[in-house]
Amino acid sequence: MVHTSGKPHVAGLVLAAGGGRRLGGRPKALLEHRGRPLVENAVRVLRAGGCRSVHVVLGAAADEVLRRADLSGCVVSVNPDWEQGMGSSLRTGLASLGAADGDPDAALVSLVDQPGIGAAAVARVVAACDSLSALVSAAYEGRRGHPVLFGVTRWEAVAERASGDRGARDYLREHENEITLVECGDVAEPYDIDTPADLAHLE
């Protein structure tokens, strides 16, 4: 790797722009988990899992999120087109990473609404980053899930393919045979907080 420590500089990227349409318009970043906004949990998990820097993409109720959530030490971007879906937020986040100090070697992308995925899963994916072209994904009983890590040489192509609600799905499907899958089903649960029933997962 290019960094003298011998370990890649992996930056965490939290996609936290969603408006929670199926939750009655409650922005996901602001859902309460352990007494704090859910976005804080996502940031804490990335740091504990070994991400050297953390970028956060906000969208819905961004001003309120910035008021209520402690995002100190994070690089925060606001996606003005968040209603177009996750793809635009991924592009916003990769642009933020591309302009970042410290020249990250890779980006580990996580979703704000997956609190069942903790630092242990993040650490496993980070540990599998071995080159600037790394493509690593957590897997759950063999099925690809989050987080997903993209080496820096892939960012431009990932951004080009990111559209609508699909995020990096098209890119990952096209490069499936290049993905290193890291099983995380023993340390994490990949559920999403999408509907009112899912709120039971929050503490």
Image: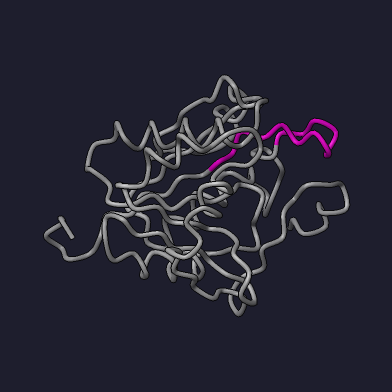
Q: Residue at x 71, y 34 (%)?
A: 27
Q: Quadrant of residue 134?
A: bottom left
Q: Which residues are magenta?
A: 15-27
Query: If the image is split into quadrants, where does the N terminus sit?
Result: bottom left
Q: Nearer the viewer, residue 35 or 56?
A: 56
Against 154, residue 148 (above or below) is below
The total of numbered circles placed on residues is 0
Q: Residue at x 72, y 54 (%)?
A: 192
Residue 19 magenta: yes
Residue 146 locus on image (x, y percent): 57, 58
Residue 76, quarter of the rendered image = top left
* 199 sits to left or right of 169: right
> Which residue is at the front of the view, 97 or 160?
160
Q: Quadrant of the C terminus?
A: bottom right
Give the farthest residue toward the left: 4
Residue at 58 percent across and 75 percent down: it is 187
Residue 126, picture quadrant: bottom left
Q: As rendered, which of 175 and 182 lies closer to the eye?
A: 175
Magenta span: chief secondary structure: loop
